[in-house]
Image (cartoon, rainbow, N blue to C red):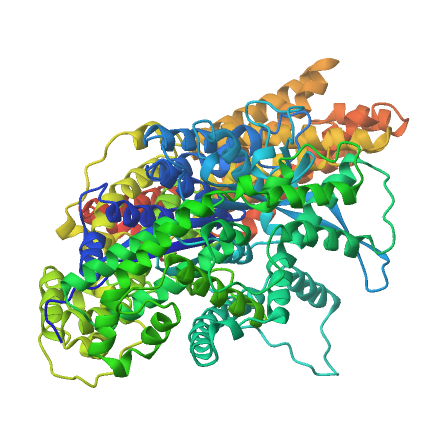
Amino acid sequence: MDGTAEPWQQEIRLAMTMVGGASLAIWMGGVATETSQLLRESRRETPPGLYRKLLDLLRASVSIDVLTGTSAGGINAACLGLAEAFRSTPQVLRNTWISTGSLENLVRDAKEAQPRSVLDGDRVLLGDVEKALRQITADGTPPKDEPDVTVLLTGTMIDGETTRFDDALGNLVRDTEHRMLFRFCGPLWTVGVEGPLALAARSTASFPGAFELSRMPIGAGGADRLHPDMTPYTELTRSHWLTDGGVLLNKPLRPALREIFERSSHADVRRLLLYVVPTGEGETDAVGCDPADPPLLSNAMAKVVNTVMSQSISAELDDLTRHNDAVLRARDTRVSLAALGLRGGPEHLVDARIAAAYRERRTAEDAAELVRVAARRYALAEPGTQWASGLSRRLRDIAVAGLRGDIPATPPAARVPVADLVAYRTTALDDAVAIGLQLINAGFRLQGDATRAQELNAAREKLHQARKTAGRGKRLGQWVTEHAGPGGRSLETWIGALAREWVEPAKTAAVADAWPLLVEGLRSAAPVLRTLAEAAPEKAEAVTTLLDWLALGPDGASGDDVLQARLLTLHVATRGLLAQAPSVDQRVDLVQVSADSRTLLDMTRRRSWDKLTGMQASYFGAFYKASWRASDWMWGRIDGAGWLVQCLLDPVRLATLRDIVGRDRFRDELVASLKPGWRTPDERDRCTPDEAEQLRDQLTAELAFLGLDADLGPVDKPDAERPVSMPVTAMVLARARQAEIAAEELPVVTLAAHYDADDRTDIGEALAEELPPVAVDAAQARFQACRVSDEKFAGEQGTARLTRTLVALGAATVNAGTVAFRLPGGWPRTVAGLLRTVARSTARVSQGASRLGTAGSLAAGVLALLAGLVIGNNGAGILQWVGLPVLAGAAVYLATALLTSGHKVRWLFVALGALVVAALLLAAFLPPLARPFFGWLGDVVAGWRRGEGAVWWLVVSGLLILPAVATPVSSLVRRLGHRRARTREAKGVVLAVAGRAPRKKTAERSRAASSH
């Protein structure tokens, strides 16, 4: 083996799917930002770091071209896709999530007259997402060429669109499709895309009930600045109201796979699909089947609802497996057919039957797509049209006939000029490029020297250029949607015209320019491949067979027409014989990216529940506090870095480099690249001695096939087995990058914790300022001291923030619920109005009380209580009516103060409050209380009994009963520590993150309070 051999450059192409998860989207935003860092280092747009060092070692580059997202994950997918198109970064999303993603910010004002939801989707979410997107484009550069990135966001139409087809007997079958996709790709990435992209992200994140439905205009009618015309970004034909994309598709793997399978690669790539899900699926809980103890109705209904909402990805994984198997079959089939053609003669490889099967399979899928989109558009353009029996089959036949175009029905000739190849369009060219890449990749495995490697790489570039030249750049479905409609023609006539237009020569003329580039690349590679094959004949059977079939002999005497004919014949034979040929000749490997992973920054936090505050409250937890969102964002970047490093460390690629470059030379390269900063796991990573020893043994096993041990020392194990993956090696390497992330993000967590401790929400301006980072050397210790991820809602009970948030949510829920239905007139509307009034008044009073602090609230509540008693007892007429609401407001004030006070104070006031409330409720019926204190209540009750002032009595009763019920119940259920102790604990977290120990007395008090 020649020690100076140089391998080909590898392209690692990523696709990413982000699922729904409410506030867990903040963690996913951190993953997206760290992915952007990898991509920017690959393009050398940022100072080199760990990723650049690994890519140089691997002779690789990384790009991302497909992103799918649903629900809140769609916001992150939109931001990362836009950042890639404009060569920017989605880092601004951190500040957006921290400042905008607060429940106090998102919840609607209880004073709104006609709220459509509890949280504000258009005013807050849509507006702030659009600002973030505009900041991303402002920090980048408008693309000169069409960016090779596609973003797909899911949505759910509440009314759907109808598709028609026939059953086996020709009868009409209607199907209503509620799922839809927003598609942002190449030509759509222009200045001004921020508005449509923001609306798409807002639409997919319209969590039912929490956010209102999203209005999506199709056409200029009804469009405005925040709701632009979405026609270019969907295949829909009319405007719709949309709800959350995760309702029907919360794990959008299938759209990602379809996009990948239909996407031609301009390079030979390693394709990875990153499935970003904050926490993996747990084991199912088995339900006993004891006939004597069947599930109760409530348990049964809960399981049924959970079953309906559960969305499996088994079908998508099966599709992925079938595709990868089809790729291997297609490659093996090419070589076998080439060998068969050499034995029997080229003219016998394809007969009339195979040629006919090829034509049918080439057009069947395109015909089905054309009929589906066109029939839906026709039904909307011509409402009330009748669907005749067997029409679907007839339409498919018409589409197939039109899409065949000029594809010959006979086998290819012995010589095929370029002019005749145009009829076969881009599919034949793509297969020919795949044959060339298969040859060149096999040639690299024969281990030539640096000169030959350079020649093969140059030939590869010609093949990529040919494929890119012939690319159409527009999908069939989108192309059909852009047409105005049938315009009075019948559906059969219109579909036939569309099919013929799609394949007309003017639209495929670029294929004629691409074939000469392909032929040139193959001819330049042939001499090198022939030389390498002769030097290692035992490894070169596939190379020799394909070269002989293509008539690329040593003399190069065959003409271009013969080479083109052989490529076309092999393409027709392969597609005609294979039951399901792969749509694109590349494998796709799935990688799940989750928070259930280890990091050597802190080995004690390994699971999502140990790391993410967003796991609480049905995944809405991180929306509660700014420091919780900042912590989850930091964990997203840290977990993302660990997974990305593991993806880069591909054992197959490392073994290939070892074999091509040479074992000793590549081992020296590894040591030189990885040794700086290399440290095996130890107690500084919060490992136990046994864990550290176990990790060290696993590290040695992972590196043995490269001739290295855990300390990167040389070992001689030529027979060491290549591992499937290298997780511990990735953990050791990623630790340095993760420490840099912690050094950058910990100041933000510290700032957010300061604002939380002071109960402030105006953090936006402070985040815009540049914060001094923590020293990288000290970052690991500071990260381990930061325990924001340990905070739970149980420790927040009784705080002013939680009380204020719950009351605001409750008031907004009541306000939205009372206008959610068209109530009949009379008492239903009266009761609904009373409920709104009570909720609004309670929210307004409690908001003010919670911000005064416990002492201020108690004082204000007592003063208001006395004022209500005095006014109600001594006033006359209208003043008596004013006195009781004042009294009720005072009760709410006192209730809020009690909820945010220490438990000793609360028990005292609960007892007094219970007596006062009981007195108020019974005053009108107990003469000893009614006469001296509440005589005016007796008049009110007497009037009410006579049918006078019933509405006012309901108001009075509601205002009295609300605090009377809420205060004792919450006081009995919630046992809490002192508010000042909790504040000291929060400030202790801040000091720990900042690297300063809290004062001894303060720390002792905090521990004493937490032990209660």
Q: Residue furthest bottom?
A: 719
Residue 680's spot in the image, x, y percent? 16, 69
User: Camera-side residue: 574 or 919?
Assistant: 574
Q: Residue 620: horizontal and vertical position, in percent?
A: 50, 48
Residue drawn at x 72%, y 45% is: 496
Indicate the quadrant where residue 316 lies: bottom right
> Compared with residue 953, is residue 356 higher up or lower down, i.e. above or below?
below
Q: Is residue 518 left or right of residue 445?
A: right
The answer to whether any part of residue 446 appears in the image is: no
Nearest the viewer among 6 and 86 is 6
Residue 896 appears in the rendering: yes
Left or right: 565 in relation to 356: left
Q: With respect to residue 660, does 749 lie above or below?
A: above
Q: In this view, does 46 lie above or below 674?
A: above
- Quadrant where the N terminus sits is bottom left
Does residue 107 appear left or right of residue 386 in this picture?
A: left
Q: Which residue lies furthest to the right in this view?
A: 946
At 42% from the left and 75% from the top, the residue drawn is 335
Is 763 displayed left or right of 51 in the figure?
Answer: right
Residue in the picture at 36% in, 48% down: 30
Image quadrant of residue 381? Answer: top right
- Residue 897 position within the rendered picture, expressed as x and y whole percent measured from the top left: 49, 36
Q: How many dots with numbers?
A: 0
Of the pair 693 and 354, the residue shown nearer to us: 354
Q: Assign the C terminus to one quadrant of the image.
A: bottom left
Q: Position of residue 395 (x, y in %)?
A: 76, 51
